[in-house]
Amino acid sequence: MQSGKIAILFFFIHITLTAQEQKRDSVNINSSLDEVVVTGQFEPQSLKKSVQNVRVITRTDINQLGANNLGDVLNQYVNITVRPSGTDGRSTVSMFGLDGLYFKILIDNVPLVNEAGLGNNIDLSQINLNDVERIEIIEGSMGVTHGANAVSGILNIITKKSSKNKWEISATLQEETIGDEYAMFDEGRHIQGLQVSHTLTDNWFISLNANRNDFQGYLGDKNGQDYTVNDDTRGYNWLPKEQFMTNALLSYRRNDFRFFYRFEIMDENIDYYNSQVETLFNTELGSYKAAQDKRYFTDRFYHHLNATGKLFSKLAYNVSVSHQKQQRDVESFLYRITQDQEVNNITETDQSMEVLYSTGTFSNFFESDVVKLQLGYELVNNNGFSVVQEADNVFVGLRERLENYDVFASSEVNVIEGFSLRPGFRYSFQSRFDNQYAASLGFRKLFKNDYQLRGAIGKSFRTPTFEELYTKMIFSGHYFTGNENLIPETSTSYEVSLKKNSYFDSGLMLTNNLIVSFMDVEDRITTAFTGYTDDNVPMYESINVSKYNMWNVSTTNQLQYENLSVSFGATLAGVSQELDNGDFKSDDKYLYTLNLNSSVSYRVPKWNTTFSAYYKYNGKTQQYTADEEQYVLTTVPATNWLDVSVIKSFLDNRVNLTLGARNLLDVTNITRTGSTQTGSHAASNSVMLAYGRSYYIKLMYNLNF
């Protein structure tokens, strides 16, 4: 494997050193960011010319939301649901009813690692937005260009790589309540950030970013760390978490040749306080109160080397090499509450994933305005580790390697003026599973009066995760295992959209987009009840038994007039799933969900102030889940979410003050209800969606020269 790594590195160096200087690209990436996209394209081009539907989240949107991480941004968009968890501190994404395992998150077109995989099921709270220029989202199957697990869509974070100023220095302070809890050091959220970038010459650019996010946890109805009564109320409803994120970027550009290297370190600490309080005794202390507590330490490093340019003054290339690792360690200890002492501290690695990754595309093989051809490759080497519990107090470290080596081809054919076809095919050589493939065919037709018709059909696949394959959790009253015999899921998706841009003499601009899509997933992996142990403990296992169908109708609409910007979106989705564990099946009827969103932003130039409001309606969601004897239909009721902010600039925009409120409608816990298909059984439990209404103040100082 070392020889393979060396070969990749030498190949990268070779194409970098042989790049020829040519005139600059006809598309200026730094201008009109709302209209120029790069994700899934042969080259940067206008949104109108893209065969895919690309949704762009601008830097302005991020600022107006006062977003700390990616979850704060995505929480406001239709078709996307953010799933936070107060018990482990993670926030993941769901699209079209499919969780984060089917949705791929990339930074500068390279998937981001987490403890369990690459690009999927990413913790959104671990993605800082300080150096983000914009975010591009494509919904639907993207398996041809982005490989395994790009089933429901991809999200590509585009980072900043140049500046029009010689120096840009920005310092940020943000203070935020957590629900109704706040104190300067002990409660609430406290954020500090520093960004420094420097244009060294006309060709060289460097930037450094550092950010600290101190979330002090949310007590709610709990009583914190020092509570000594054993009534199950010790600890926090939302665990305290502290994050440090640092990244650096060095970029170079001259004519057609561009190069950048990006490095990032993320360090996260989460404190877990056991709700059970014990009364212990020793000769030194006598009787004392204690609890078995834990800390979770997560570290990530990220290297990304990229070069784009032309070989032999013609052949365009875009090649990336990335080395990433994310690891979680767990420190267990006995906390003597009344003495404020920790004893018996033991730290062990719980999960880790190390990845060597490379992807590249080559295009512009021949001069033609009619046909464009792109060839590409993707190399993935995942080295995963996890601790599995094979029996009570028997823990075993498990390390496995998952690899795939893919090649793909895509073409764009301008059949007639205004009508383009885009066929594509990928073949994936898998080390652990049967070889897989992805295929797609898309089209775009431009009509008079700026009507744009798009359509696509795509086949993709999702490979089982490290956890689904190898995890074991076997202890008293609990028996869950992975399954090494799992096979990849396969999917087929269809999409048609109609977009209209309208421009009026008054300066009013309207954009309306209607999208209809359908998706079918075969051999879906689910957790199923498989029987009882000899001790009468129910057993659960990951198996390929489910079928999944989804259809979706959505619309997005934008209005811009002078200093006013208004948007409205709606989506109605129907999901049909058949769950079958061999003994009983779930109903496969369609279950429907309605989501709405709207935003309004108004800038008052005289005051140099912008007022913004973002609203999201999450309709009720239903799904079948397994218990020991049947599949139960559970329902999560509808919720309404509203964020508002006011941004005021002072001293020639050197100082920006933001005042805002999140979750103004005060969403907290909701009750998920469940009943069997016959209605003979009912159950309910509480789902922690949020910790209530919060307020924040953000102060940013910018020094540009």
Image (cartoon, rainbow, N blue to C red):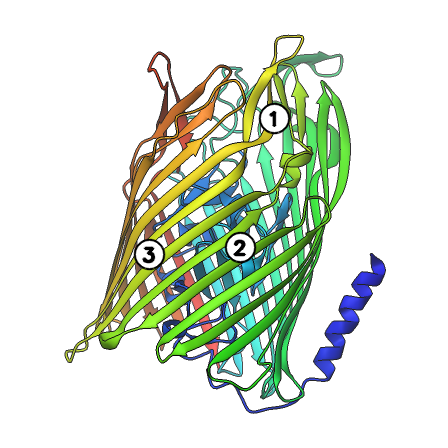
Judging depth in this view, the residue of 494 and 526 nearest the camera is: 494
Residue farthest toward the top in the current orientation of the protein: 535
* Badge 3 or badge 1: first in the primary sequence: 1
Q: Residues within 10 Å of mark 2 (few under 14, many from 20)?
A: many
Amino acid on which the number 2 mark rests in the picture: Ile
Residue farthest toward the front in the current orientation of the protein: 415
Q: CA distance from mark 1 to mark 2?
A: 27 Å
Residue placed under numbered mark 1 in the picture: 541
From what the image shows, is residue 22 above or below residue 177?
Answer: below
In the rendered image, residue 459, in percent from the top left (x then y), is placed at 51, 52
Q: Is residue 168 left or right of residue 501?
A: right
Point out which mark residue 659 bears.
3
Q: How many marks?
A: 3
Point out which mark residue 105 bears.
2
In the rendered image, residue 9, in percent from the top left (x then y), is placed at 77, 69
In this view, the mark in front (3 or 1): 1
Q: Secondary structure at mark 3?
A: strand
- Residue at the image point whose x is 38% and y is 48% from the top: 518
Amino acid on which the number 3 mark rests in the picture: Leu
Q: CA distance from mark 3 to mark 2?
A: 30 Å
Judging depth in this view, the residue of 106 and 374 nearest the camera is: 374
Check if mark 1's residue and mark 2's residue have beta carbons within 8 Å. Answer: no
In the rendered image, residue 669, in percent from the top left (x then y), is placed at 37, 31
Q: Secondary structure at mark 1?
A: strand
- Residue at the image point whose x is 55% and y is 28% from the top: 527
